[in-house]
Image (cartoon, rainbow, N blue to C red):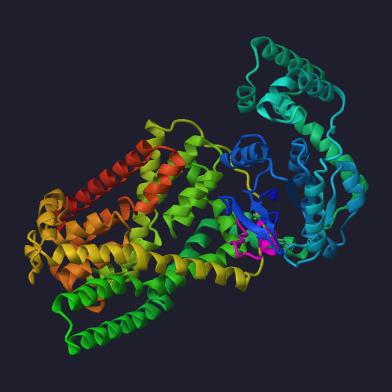
Amino acid sequence: MIIALAGNQNSGKTTLFNQLTGSNQHVGNFPGVTVEQKIGALISYSDVSIVDLPGIYSLSPYTSEEIVTRDYLVKQRPDAILNIVDATNIERSLYLTLQLIELQIPMVLALNMMDEVYANNGSIDSFALSNSLGIPAVPISAAKKQGLDELAETVLNAATKKTPPQRIDFCSGAVHRAIHAISHTIEDHADLCGLPARFAATKLVEGDELMLAALGLSDNERHMIDHIVSEMETEMDTDRESAMADMRYQFIEEACKISVVKPHKSKEYLLSAKIDSVLTHKIFAIPAFLAIMVVMFTLTFGGIGAALSRLMLIGVDALIEIVGNALVLNGYNQVVCSLIVDGILSGVGAVVSFLPIIVTLFFFMSILEDMGYMARVAFIMDKPLKSIGLSGRSFVPMLIGFGCTVPAIMSARTIPSEKDRKMTILLTPFMSCSAKIPIYSIFCAAFFSKMQGLAMGCLYIIGIVLAVLAGTAMKKVAFKGMPGPFVMELPNYRFPSPKSVLLLLWDKAKDFLHRAFTVIFLATIIIWFLQSFDSRFNYVVDSSNSILAGIGKNLAYFFTPLGLFDWRIATSLITGFTAKETILSTLGVLSGVSAAELPNALAGMFTPLSAFSFLVFVLLYTPCAATVATVKREYGSWTGAAFTMGFQTGFAWFAAMLAYQIGSIFV
Ligand code: GDP
Ligand code: MG
């Protein structure tokens, strides 16, 4: 049995999903967090699955999430829909409810956040509301775990008995006549496609092109529908979409008049409004944002994170020494010692010692997100982003991109316009993801030690500035047109939940370690092998005679204009296509030093200028194999993914080349 969880963004779907299934999905005070459907079994009913769908406001195909959700509901036809609404803002939420009811799937309404409604002297007569809508309504509080048993029981009941919604007619007057006339006309086509006629008819009245195409109507039928709709438009004196919206809101207003006592504005809301008068202020907003970012980065890269990272490095080094000594003492073969110490331990160790920095950065980011500040940032950034032809919506993926490009690209699904989405996917990798942090830190420590924090900041900013330039250029060439409109609600500020923050930290740390011990582990072994043997598989002591050196020396020509002459550098950049951290482990393995000595070894390979051009290249070229796979999935084609990769690598090469060539004039 399958129960689909549908509702607006921020209505508490994921919170409810976690409670019902006992899982630990990420809950965000931030629209657009759930991008993929998640499935879990209902606690104590292992045969009942619950699917957490992306948050949507309507079943009209405005955004690709709405299409995903609609396709899922129409094609998979779950056994029941659990429609969750934010009871503090019920009128708006019911707009989706009315559309879901038309699908004629057994359905239950969960009135969530009742705790807040009661706390602010509101109330909802769920029986009266249930009567008006023709579906059961259960008041709950997902966060406070109230009413969940009754809700589960009601949904299971509706699903087993297959009770469809008792009422589908919410319309009156001219709209009513139009919907019914069209519904009769297309009934046979709708049956053939397995769509409820009533749902198809409403979509046609709204002018939904996808629906029109899906039904396969004859020319005559299309004309008839056009006539019916234009008759309705004349009678109602509005266009088709507003006529439908008016009809729905009118019904909702009537139903709520009987059953809802609106809560007054909550303390939280009033407090949020006060804070927002500063943080989203016309002039202070951006300086405040920059100040918050500076504090966050300084604490991460200069303070807490860096200190913890140094401790970790000492630990890793001690471990390498102990293991190395033990191997030698026990008389293990020289090749085995080299594999374990110079290969695996130095390679993986170089990466793992950055775990504290990454965890610290995510600690701050998740606190800001959980408090509700990140949603404000998207709102503040709408205007600057408009000037490069994107909307504030693109900011969410870009921001997630500072963590990891893969979920960032996935979250671009929340962007309604196709053009905005493609452009965002192309630009997101310019944001420095956390895998690049280890590389930046080591290079900045080795070459720009006097102004380490500043140098790190510059790299982040170079990425952003180049994204802006590339965006502006693309808008002129390939993605013409206005960005889509951006409407987003700002959730109330609240105290960050320790559970939510810890879960996110654990998730990120797990991800990072997982990469270190899979992709990077494997890459280290392969690189160690290629650099320890020559083409006749003899063990070589001097790695410049190895297979890898042979390959790297050929590749080095390609990087010569960038000031990167050493074959080891070229090799590390190639292995960097698998994952950015491998660059460090490759450099570590190839220079044959431990993580702590790496900065010194690098000083021999680079000049400050070539280090800079190297960093620019690293910043801009394809982040990792996982990103390429994700881009392929989102674009739906390898051509798109290959183009993205080519674009990024070409752009990176060109930018690094300019940096080096222009730099050499001055240095
Ligand atoms: P989704 O976007 O629909 O998945 O919503 P989430 O589950 O991520 O929740 C959005 C926000 O609402 C989070 O900050 C939750 O902590 C909060 N929330 C969820 N359920 C309740 C509830 O019953 N009462 C209150 N006061 N807050 C809730
Ligand atoms: Mg969610």
Q: Which residues are magenta?
A: 14-30
Tally the marks: 0
Quarter residue 424 falls in? top left
Q: Quadrant of the C terminus?
A: bottom left
Is residue 21 in the magenta section? yes
**Residue 158 x, y percent position in the rendering:** 81, 48
Tell me: residue 129, above or below residue 432: above
Quarter residue 337 falls in? bottom left
**Residue 596 x, y percent position in the rendering:** 25, 78
Horizontal arrangement in the rendering, residue 479 relative to residue 456 (left or right): right
| Residue at the (40%, 54%) spot, across then down | 431
Quarter residue 352 falls in? bottom left
Q: In what quadrant does ligand 2 lie? A: bottom right
Horizontal arrangement in the rendering, residue 318 relative to residue 43 (left or right): left
**Residue 91 x, y percent position in the rendering:** 80, 46
| Residue at the (44%, 74%) spot, across then down | 299
Tell me: residue 318, above or below residue 142: below
**Residue 227 x, y percent position in the rendering:** 73, 13
Is residue 385 in the magenta section? no
| Residue at the (23%, 48%) spot, across then down | 653
Horizontal arrangement in the rendering, residue 188 relative to residue 471 (left or right): right
Which residue is at the front of the view, 648 or 662?
Answer: 648
Tell me: residue 328, above or below residue 141: below
Q: Is residue 391 visible?
A: yes
| Residue at the (45%, 71%) spot, across then down | 359
